[in-house]
Amino acid sequence: MSLSLKSTAAMPSSSSGPEVTVPSLGKDLVGLEPLSAEQIQLILDTAEPFKEVSERQIKKVPALRGKTIVNLFFEASTRTRISFEFAEKRLSADTVNVASSGSSVSKGETLVDTARNLEAMRIDMVVIRHGSSGSAKFLGDRIRSNVINAGDGKHEHPTQGLLDLLTLRDKFGKINGLKVAICGDVLHSRVARSNIWGLTKLGAEVAVCGPATLMPRDIESLGVTIIPRIEDAIQWADALNILRLQLERMTAGFIPSLREYNRVFGVTRDRLDKAPRDLVIMHPGPMNRGVEIDSDVADGEHSVILPQVTNGVAVRMAVLYLLAGGSPDWAEGGER
Amino acid sequence: MPTRTPLLDDRAIARALTRMASEIVEKCHGIDGLVLVGIQRRGVELAERLARQIEAAEGGKVGRGKLDITLYRDDLQTIGPRPVVSETRLPPSLDGRTIVIVDDVLYTGRTIRAALDEFADFGRPRRILCCVLVDRGGRELPIHADFVGTSVNTGPQDRVDVFVTEIDGRDAVELVRA
């Protein structure tokens, strides 16, 4: 099918010149690593008009009317799942939520079988969260529907990376040249990886800061610097993205105690007061107040933690909108 | 080889806008509750010019809005790559107000249909009118314009190009015949 079929006949009553369409993202969104800077920019730019939709009294546009989207969550999630669901509903898509407990997944069905069975019911998109790194790509390569990664193991969480980028861009007006420090449990964090890819592609300088036990080997190969002390990271950065310390890490022996973590790496008011400039504070949630971030920082005037959540819906609407416009030949992805 | 014929030059566009501005005020009995809503992108510039003319003549503020109808298109499910979405900005409430939709070209009527659907999600205007710089015929829906800059008969292969200074660096309307 030709991609320019709409230029004269179908829509434009304003036939002033050829219509502007956007370059494609491809069939799936599995991470920010495979995307170009232009594609990331495109998603952020597309998210802008979607912010306004959520401010309307009737928060709904018919853009994805008739599309069926399955939210396939094999791991616990509140924020991300609700954010995706709002995004889908505000675009008028029909949605179904599948959680691993209480579904055939708990009876031992494989991921691909689950997805193929869903596809047999004629769905259009799958949003997947899964504990195994690479599961989103694995699925995307095997089914025809668009696949959006909502977090796969320690690999990526692209929509979180995108909403962090959008929030930084809102705050600073640009990403290029910004200094962003990602603090905490980088080792287990898919948020950190998506942030690193997105930020470096758009020209920001990225540093990581955290206990050596929670720092992946060779992290510098992603183009980031390691700042071992949180005080130094605060001196250096324009913005801090403070990762959640997963409490189970303590029992696994990565850190001695939560109190010690807070004493050495916690982002506190005292530490921030010594910074040469006001730092923008981000956190992907859910927060452990008093561990990685103190309450007066989380609720402080430079915190953009709640704007991050608001932007999450807009960014996810943009991704859904852009992927739903897939050209027919992408549908060959599924091997039957 | 397509031929390009000028339909309106900058002065003709200015005269058409002046005339339409006074027609709008006349038909709406003043500017109370009036909102001019431009369709992205060139309709927004035309609406702004009309609003300024009306304000100069009437000495009061005229409401303005901009509308992107992309998400309300009826062909969104069938087209391949996604059209760019631009900003929508409307007054907080449209209830009881008189809306004049401003666009550059009226053709199939599908843009106006989409705009009417979108307004329904913003409230219940008292009245909605339609103002276009060029009516090129070829309607596919029962929609008409209340204020027209100029009318021209065109075929489906033809194109009407509207240029506005704010975007294109000049004011002109040209007919491109295939």
Image: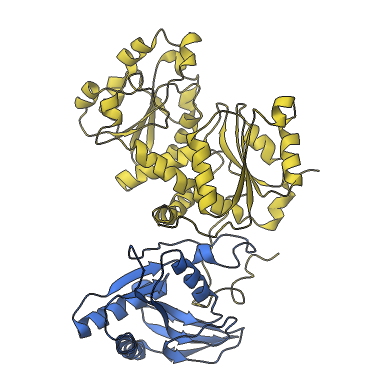
> Considering only vertical position in the picture, is A123 above or below A200?
below
Q: Quadrant of the C terminus of chain A?
A: top right
Which chain is displayed in blue in the rendered image? B
Q: Which residue does the image show at 21% across and 21% down from the upper left?
A: A270
- Left or right position of B169 against A196: left
Closest to the observer, B167 or B106:
B106
Q: Position of residue B85 (x, y in %)?
A: 47, 61
> Considering only vertical position in the picture, is A135 above or below B28?
above
Q: Position of residue A42 (x, y in %)?
A: 48, 52
Closest to the observer, B152 or A116:
A116
Which chain is displayed in yellow in the rendered image? A
Q: Which residue does the image show at 59% across and 51% down from the upper left?
A: A323
> Considering only vertical position in the picture, is B139 above or below B125?
below
Q: Position of residue A172 (x, y in %)?
A: 30, 44
Locate residue B164: give its quadrant: bottom left
Q: Quadrant of the N terminus of chain A?
A: bottom right
Q: Which residue does the image show at 47% across and 67% down from the upper left?
A: B118
- Left or right position of A138 against A302: right
> Considering only vertical position in the picture, is B123 above or below A13?
above
Residue found at the very far right of the displayed protein: A336
- What colour scheme governs how the chains and residues are painted in the rendered image of this protein? by chain
Disc tally is 0
Q: Position of residue A132 (x, y in %)?
A: 62, 26
- Left or right position of B33 against A162: left
Does residue A319 appear in this view? no
Does residue B26 appear in this view? yes
